[in-house]
Image (cartoon, rainbow, N blue to C red):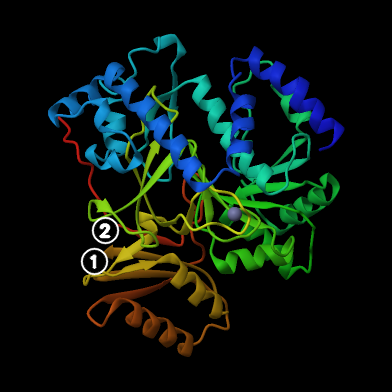
Amino acid sequence: MSAYSRFLRSVALPVGSRLAGYGDFLPYLKSLEASQWFSSEQIQEIQNAKLRRLIAHVYQNVPFYRQVMDERGLTPADIQTTDDLVKLPIVDKKILTRYYDTTLRDQSIPRSKLIHATSSGSTAERLHYWTTKSQKAKKWAGLFRWWEMVGYEFGDSYVTFQLAPNQGFKGWPVAGKLEWLLLRHHWLSAQKMTDEVLNQYVENLKAWRPKLFRSYASTVYYLARRMNEAGLNVHVPAILATGEMLTDHMRETMERAFAPGRVYNEYGGDGMQIAAECEMHDGMHINAETYVVEIIKDGEQAPEGELGEVVLTNLEATATPFIRYNIHDVAALTHEPCACGRGLPRLSHLEGRLTDMFVTADGHWLTVHQFTAFFAKVHSVKAFQVIQKEVDFILIKLVVDESFSEADRQRIIETFRGYMGPDNRFELQFVDEIPTSPVGKRRFFISEVIEGTPSQVEIDD
Ligand SMILES: [Zn+2]
């Protein structure tokens, strides 16, 4: 560890974070740094102990859970391990947003301590919930553990590349600009990405020599593609791709522009730092001391290795409890040991947003990977977006160059027939560009049909 990093960890961060009310940050980070190397069983024990504490607390202090458990004839003693979670109902964004300020609010926390939060999801419907400084501090600790896992130390230069400058320590009044200076944080705007702007960014990266570069997967992919076309290359030891699906093709493109083997997938959502890749690039380790991940298919826990919906329990959140929260992503889970030696379980596959997947009329799931892999081979297609308008009707938007041929068109149609079965209708639409979503993501795949597992609580009106 460098002297500067030691100074930050032992002086600047503890003092600054305590002054700002985020004193839980460094102690929690230190505990996470240690426990990642515990055995799978020890980590399971941490989860169970935290779960018992959480359930006892919400039973006392959150009317929603008092009522749900009373109705089911449950007491806190009935929830001993994560296997007992199935006794509680699955909830979702609708339920939390509907009740967060009434029955789902932790009555033991004074209102003055509650911090309102919303998710920045790409859909119009936003999640609203309460958090606290302690919860936020623990969330950042989870994030920085992922960064450390890929070689970052406090004080290393890092760059974020997104629409707005995302301050790692946003809300620390004493830090402000100082945080940026101390932590050597630089920001590149993803607002406008012309060739000239992207060339300038390459120069910036060369000058700043960041240890870590963090961005939405599609944004950094776009930059990397431009760099490869122009024969440009910058060595950055860790590229963290967040916020959306990272396909193999995108990863290869980024590795060519930056560094082989140094692109890491990071998975978070709705205010949670859920999982990230270690140096083995073999699935994503779950932040298991903070979140219990269940994989649910047809309302039940799916066997290990099988795809299902990601249902999360935040063991450190009570302001608005996230207990069996369906985040509507699709993944598979494994407890097999990872070669890195960490005992944290992994998501062996992350297939992305439920809305990034299609279900055909005969019940097959199609995932975005199939389509990105296919279109990567059709060189005349510069960009694409696949939209499932109805269960049996797909609209394919394509941006093509002058080399696009009738043979390409036939190949696309045949491939889609193969994926979808013969009874489905298709339409190819040639467009000048694929628009980005309001938060700046470029979505490859949109289903206007899929709903997902409904929450198991009824909303009274
Ligand atoms: Zn690992």
**Mark 1 neighbour density, 10 Å: few (under 14) some (14–19) many (20 or more):** some
| Residue 409 found in image quarter | bottom left
- Tell me if I can see residue 313 in this picture: yes
User: Residue lying furthest bottom in this view?
Assistant: 407
- The quadrant the C terminus occupies is top left
Determine which quarter of the picture holds residue 308.
bottom left
Disc 2, SS: loop
Residue 302, x across and y down, in percent: 31, 57
Give me the disc on residue 449. Answer: 2
The one nearer the camera, 433 or 183, is: 183
**Could you tell me residue 386's position as x and y percent?**
40, 66
Residue 235 vertical position relative to residue 228 in the rendered view, above or below: above
Disc 1 and disc 2 in contact, CB within 8 angstroms: yes
**Residue 186 position (above or below residue 18):** below
Identify whether 65 is placed above or below 198. above
**Residue positioned 66% across, 56% down in the render:** 279
Residue situated in front as seen by the camera: 24 or 357: 24
Q: Quadrant of ligand 1?
A: bottom right
Q: Which mark is residue 225?
A: none
Badge 2: how crowded within 10 Å, few (<14), some, or many (20+)? some
Q: Residue at x 80, y 30 (%)?
A: 6
In-image side of 190 versus 81 (left or right):
right
- The amino acid sitting under disc 1 is Val
**Secondary structure beneath label 1:** loop
- Three-letter amino acid code of the residue under disc 2: Val
Give how far across and how far down residue 59 sits, in percent: 27, 22
Which numbered tag is attached to residue 391? 1
Looking at marks 1 and 2 on the same chain, the residue that comes earlier in the sequence is marked by 1
Could you say which quadrant of the image residue 146 lies in? top right
